Image (cartoon, rainbow, N blue to C red):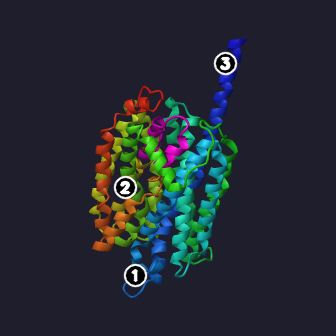
Amino acid sequence: MGIETVRTAASDEAVGRRREQRGWYFYDWACSVYSTSVLTVFLGPYLTSVARAAADADGYVHPLGVPVRAGSFFAYSVSLSVIVAVVVMPLVGAAADRTGRKKPLLGAAAYVGAAATTAMFFLGGDRYLLGGALLIVANAAQSVAMMLYNSYLPQIAPPEERDAVSSRGWAFGYAAGSLVLVLNLVLYLAHDSFGVSESTAVRICLASAGLWWGGFALIPLLRLRDRPAAVREEATAPGLRQLAATVRDMRRHRLTLSFLLAYLVYNDGIQTVISQASVYGSEELGLGQSTLIGAVLLVQLLAVAGALGMGRLARRYGAKRTILGSLAAWTLTLGAGYFLPAGAPVGFFLLAAAIGLVLGGSQALSRSLFSHLVPPGKEAEYFSAYEMSDRGMSWLGPLLFGITYQLTGSYRDAIVSLVAFFVIGFVLLARVPVRRAIGDAGNPVPEKI
C-alpha cells in the first residue's frame, strides 16, 4: 500500500509538472509576437521614418538636445532600454527569489510591456520621442518578464527534460510569431481594401502585438505556481547595488560566470541581428516592407523546426557542442550577408533561411544549459544577469551597429561588425568545462551535456 501511494504521488507530480510546462510554453506564445512583429519587422523601419520626418536639414534629430542621426535613433533606443533593464532586473530577480512570489511580478512586467506596445498605435507624424519612450518601456518590461519566465525552467523540468522543454517553448514562440505575421502581412499588403492607410496598418500591427501579449499571458499566469522561498525574505538593495551583489555571488561560481560571459557576447550578436535586420534590408538593400515581412516569416517557420531539430542534436552530441556549431553557422551567415546585392530579394530570403535554422536552437539550448549552472534557490537572481543580453535587449551590439553606421554611413559595415560577437563568443564558450561547472553549482550532471 505504501509503494502504491508513492507511485500515485509520483504520477500526480508528473501530471502537475506537465500542466505547468504547457502553461509555461504559452508565455513564449504570448510575448514572442512582440519580438517578431514589433521589434524585428515593423518598429525599426517605421520609427526610423518617423525620426526622419522630424529631422533637420542635415538628417539629425535632437532628443534632449543631443544630435543623433535619424537612422541611428532606433538602435540607440534599443540600447538605452537595456540600461533601464540593468537597473530593474536584479532588484526584481532578488525579490522573486527571496519572497517566492514570481508569478505576480511576472504578471506586472508582462502587462506593463503589453500596455506600452498597445500604445504604439498612437505613434505617428513626427512623434519619434513617443516611439522611443514606448520602445524603452516595452523592451525593459519584456526583459524583466522573460527573466522571471526563464527562471521557472529549473523548477518545472528535471535536468534530463530541460533541453526538450526549453526547445518546445521557443518553438511555441516562433509558431505564434509566424501566425501573427501572416495576419500582419494580409493587413499590410491589402490595407487599401480594409480602408486604412499604410501608416495606420503598421500602427494596427504594432498595437495588436500588445493585445496578443496581454491576452495570452493569462494562460501561464493561471497555470504556473509559486514555490516557497529557498532563502529568507529580506530587503533588496537598489538595482545597481543588487546587480553588484549578484555578480559578487557569481564569483563564487566562476565557471557559471564564464559561461554567462560567453553567452552575453554571442547573444548580443544574435539579438542585434534580430533587431537590426529589417533596417539593413530596407535601408541598405532597398527591399520593400512586404519582402521584409516575408523574410521574417520564413525565419519564424524554419526556427520552429530548427529549435526542435537542434534539441534532438543536443540529445546526441550535447548542448555545448550543438551551440558551438550554431555559432560557426552564424559567423558564415553574417559574412554572406555583407555581400548581398541591393534590390535582390532572393539572396535576402536565403540569408533568412540560414538564420531561421540556427536561431531558435542556439537560444533554446543556451537557456537550458544555463539552467544547469544556477545554484538552487537563486534562479531569478541569476537569470536577471542572463536576461540582460536576451531578446533584443543587448546594449553593446546595437550601440556598435549605430556607431558604425554613424561613422561610415554604411549599413553593410554595421552588419559585418557583428561578426566579432560570434567569434569571441565561440572562443569563450569552448573554454568552459560545463560538466565541472554544473557540479560546482550543486546540481546533478546530465549524461549528455
Tell which residue pokes out farthest to the top in this image. Answer: 1
Instruction: Name the spot of residue 173 as percent of width and height, x first.
Output: 54, 50
Q: Residues within 10 Å of mark 3 (few under 14, many from 20)?
A: few
Q: CA distance from mark 1 to mark 3?
A: 68 Å
Viewer-proximal residue among 415 and 146: 146
SS of the residue at dot 1?
A: strand
Magenta region: 362-387
Q: Residue at x 42, y 67 (%)?
A: 75
Task: Identify the residue position indicated by label 2 in the image.
Answer: 269
Quadrant placement of the C terminus: top left
Amino acid at pointer 3: Arg
Is residue 305 placed above or below 202 in the rendered structure?
A: above
Instruction: Name the spot of residue 8 as percent of width and height, x first.
Output: 69, 21
**Magenta: predominant secondary structure element?**
helix
Q: Is residue 374 magenta?
A: yes
Residue 293 in sight from this viewpoint: no
Residue 430, picture quadrant: top left
- Discs 2, 1 touching: Cβ within 8 Å: no
Q: CA distance from mark 3 to mark 2?
A: 47 Å
> Mark 3 or 2 closer to N-term?
3
Give left or right: position of 269 versus 244: left
SS of the residue at dot 3?
A: helix
